[in-house]
Image (tube, coloured by chain):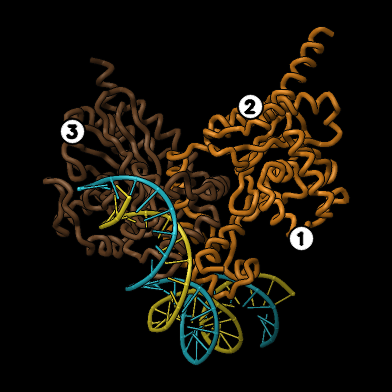
Chain colours: A brown, B orange, C yellow, D cyan
Amino acid sequence: MGTVSKALSLLDHFNRQQALIGLSEFSRLSGLNKATCFRMLSELAELGFVEQVGRAREYRLGPQVLRLAALREAAVPMRDAAMPVLRGLAQSLGETVHLSVLIGEKLRMLGFAYSPAHAMAVMMEDTDTLPFHATSSGLAVLGFSPLLFQDQVLARPLVRLTAQTLTDPVAVRARVVAVGGQGYATSAGGFEAEVDSIAFPLFDGQSRCCGALAVAAPAARLTAANRLLIRAEVAKAARQIIALWGGQVPPGVNTLWQGLLNGTLHRQIIGVER
Amino acid sequence: MGTVSKALSLLDHFNRQQALIGLSEFSRLSGLNKATCFRMLSELAELGFVEQVGRAREYRLGPQVLRLAALREAAVPMRDAAMPVLRGLAQSLGETVHLSVLIGEKLRMLGFAYSPAHAMAVMMEDTDTLPFHATSSGLAVLGFSPLLFQDQVLARPLVRLTAQTLTDPVAVRARVVAVGGQGYATSAGGFEAEVDSIAFPLFDGQSRCCGALAVAAPAARLTAANRLLIRAEVAKAARQIIALWGGQVPPGVNTLWQGLLNGTLHRQIIGVER
DNA sequence: CATTCTCGGTTTGTTATATGAACCGATGGT
DNA sequence: ACCATCGGTTCATATAACAAACCGAGAATG
């Protein structure tokens, strides 16, 4: 691994829980020598990627990332474009919604939206990187990614997070194939006990899968009827986001999704008649 | 300069005009060897800081910066907090407003807001780094920075941008001292001909100057009366932003600003009476 | 008040890594 | 057919990163 990668990997240790990290802690977290960490952090600080704050001279992310993000959004509106859709979806479903994108070989959370509808909701604060094998988002992405990428991911150790987590590559592969056949993915308690989720893949301009949109809810609230409604709404929102991003849904997937929408439309009409 | 700095400096060549940069162009812009650029960009790409796009495999900023910016904003709301104030100010004044922060030893633009009030407005698209000696923002920051920092900045070559640009360190130093005495800075055509601006310094929690809020307008629209109104409004907005950032205006500056507000209040009353 | 942590930061010889000139095949314009 | 330029690669060389040991300061502990 090159020096640049090491330095920038330091930034990966920041998360919503741990916004402040000291030098020694960086050394511990990264496994790098303290002197190495120091030099890297000094360089990062000089460039504004981190800044030192207060009493203990701990480090936190610096203002430079804001500038770059603003530039990126000006060139390629992505987060700004998607967030309103997320918020709308969270509100209409009354459940937590989150959006993740493929960065390198990791699936990373780009944003989320809560609903105030219920006192109990799935929290996403501490989730940064989504395991492919244990989340509906991960399965959704795998389901529409090249076989080569699937193999790479499934070759990595599949960590057990709950009693329900699938840790057998063969079992996961089967799920991935199923996802590819139905156009979306579901997960039941694989990431956190009693939390189910439904995820739809997102596609870029070349119809490559580049992320996922997911709804996560307490298993108890996901009745069969709810699932149908949610599935349809998330599909619609995923379509919106893909459109906003200038993406292109692969034809095969498109027809799969059409089916879902029609089915729901049908049920909604029935619902009105009742 | 360390490798990390070099690699991250590559990202500085992106701007709103040039969102896509090829390998050779990077080499030219940065003065680094093409092979060096390639390796660095490859590493940056792997981490998602840049991504390669389309036909010519050119590079652009990647989604990773969005993630980091979202984290930073979650920890230290800054841009998100300030932007509404900028927009409000732009609207109420009918002029372009911009916000810059000190990153390392550079003053970099973090955001701006336009007003639709006039067909002719000052554009900020292509401004990335503000020269200290040639902008009101720069002078505002210098006016409230430690002497050591002032010296460092004034020791650098002072580039002439327009016929009005002050390029004599002694003259600039005099302006800086004056700024310190009046609590804000003005600039007339020093950055771009026929563009005047008024800037107020911003302060962090330790009362250190960390940026500036500025209004830039065509010189013709800045009548004496307008200047007074603008000065008061920008002062108010700067106060708001500082408060939102958890900053602290130094006592001396605070009394200076009080004077400005009172003066304007007086004039506003007169205006109403007329 | 002395002891002992751990903290952020620094030093130094060693070694691994970044560097840069030349090169390659592809592409596109003339 | 030519030439220029593109993104990307190779390899000997030199530079910059590395790890361990060391500092002084501050907080906790006795």
Q: Which residue is mark 2?
A: B88
Please tell me whether mark 3 or mark 1 is closer to you in this view: 1
Subunit under mark 1: B
Q: Tell me how far mark 3 sits from mark 1, CA to CA.
A: 65 Å
Q: Which residue is mark 1?
A: B157
Quarter residue B222 falls in: top right
Q: Tell me how far mark 3 sits from mark 2, CA to CA.
A: 44 Å
Left/right of residue A64 with respect to residue A24 in the rendered view? right
Mark 2 / mark 1, whichever is N-terminal: 2
Q: Secondary structure at mark 2?
A: helix
Please tell me whether mark 2 or mark 1 is closer to you in this view: 1
Q: Which residue is mark 3?
A: A219
**Viewport quadrant of the N terminus of chain A:** bottom left
Q: Amino acid at mark 1?
A: Pro
Residue lying at the far left of the rendered structure: A163
Left/right of residue B184 with respect to residue B57 in the rendered view? right
In this view of the protein, which residue sits in the foreground, B191 or A268?
B191
Label 3–label 2 contact, CB within 8 A:
no
Q: Residue A96, can we see it?
A: yes
CA neighbours of label 3 inside 10 A, class few (<14), some (14 to 19), many (20+)? some
> How far across and down, in percent of the image, does residue B226 sit?
81, 26
Q: Residue B44, can we see it?
A: no
Q: Tell me how far mark 2 sits from mark 1, CA to CA.
A: 36 Å
Q: Amino acid at mark 2?
A: Gly
In this view of the protein, which residue sits in the foreground, A201 or A164?
A164
Rendered residue at 60%/66% (across/down) = B26
Subunit under mark 3: A
Label 2–label 1 contact, CB within 8 A:
no
